[in-house]
Amino acid sequence: MEDEGRLQANGQGGDHQRREDQRLTPLEVWDAYTRNSPVRWAANVKTPLLMLANDKDGAVDFTQGIEYYDTLRRLGKPVVLLEYPGENHGLAKLPNMRDYMERMKEFFDHYLMAEPAPDWLENGIPLSKMQQHIDERLKKDLKPAPAPAPKGGGGGGSGGVPQAPLL
């Protein structure tokens, strides 16, 4: 409903997703448009929500995600918006995929497993610092773990771990 008449980043008008039989404008069928708008039902949201809205999304106009997010925030709902600049409806860049996967895990660990909230969830990350934040997280995650200290008394071998016989 919110994108009627706007030009999306992909160059298509906001009403391009309507079926052929949906040629009426919002003003002609206002009840149907408002009934199907997530913004109308935002006050009913009770579950914490992690949203992904990307600026180059060719399926959903970016401003619709922002409008829903802003509405939920104004209502005091537990919502977090993640944006990966330059990404489409799905994530294509491996660093962004890894970052999103890790943030989903941290989000669910916090809300479902009672883990402490990570700093980004508590305080947010300004969009202007998001890429730097992702790069730092990836560097930290990609550092090799220190090798375990050898156990027991010297002599090479497998450090007390039995070896499977070669067949």
Image: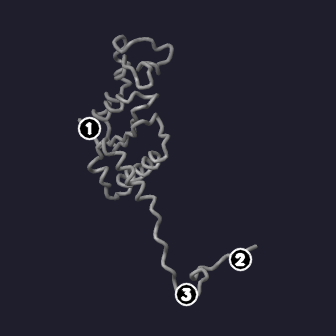
Q: Amino acid at mark 3?
A: Gly
| Pointer 3 or 1: first along the chain | 1
Q: Amino acid at mark 1?
A: Arg
Residue 10 located left or right of residue 79: right
Q: Tag 2: Cα neighbours inside 10 Å, few (<14), some, or many (≥20)?
A: few
Query: Where on the picture, by quarter, is residue 24?
Result: top left
Q: Is residue 24 above or below residue 98?
A: above
Query: Where on the picture, by quarter, is residue 48?
Result: top left
Camera-nearest label, 1 or 2: 2
Q: Is residue 91 above or below residue 36?
A: below
Residues 137 and 100: in front is 137
Residue bearing mark 2: 165
Residue 154 is labelled as 3
**Dot 3 and dot 1 residues touching (CB under 8 Å):** no
Camera-nearest label, 3 or 2: 3
Residue 99, x across and y down, in percent: 42, 49
| Pointer 3 or 2: first along the chain | 3
Residue bearing mark 1: 73
- What count of labels does the image hold? 3
Q: Secondary structure at mark 2?
A: loop
Q: Residue at x 37, y 54 (%)?
A: 136
Q: Is residue 37 above or below residue 166?
A: above
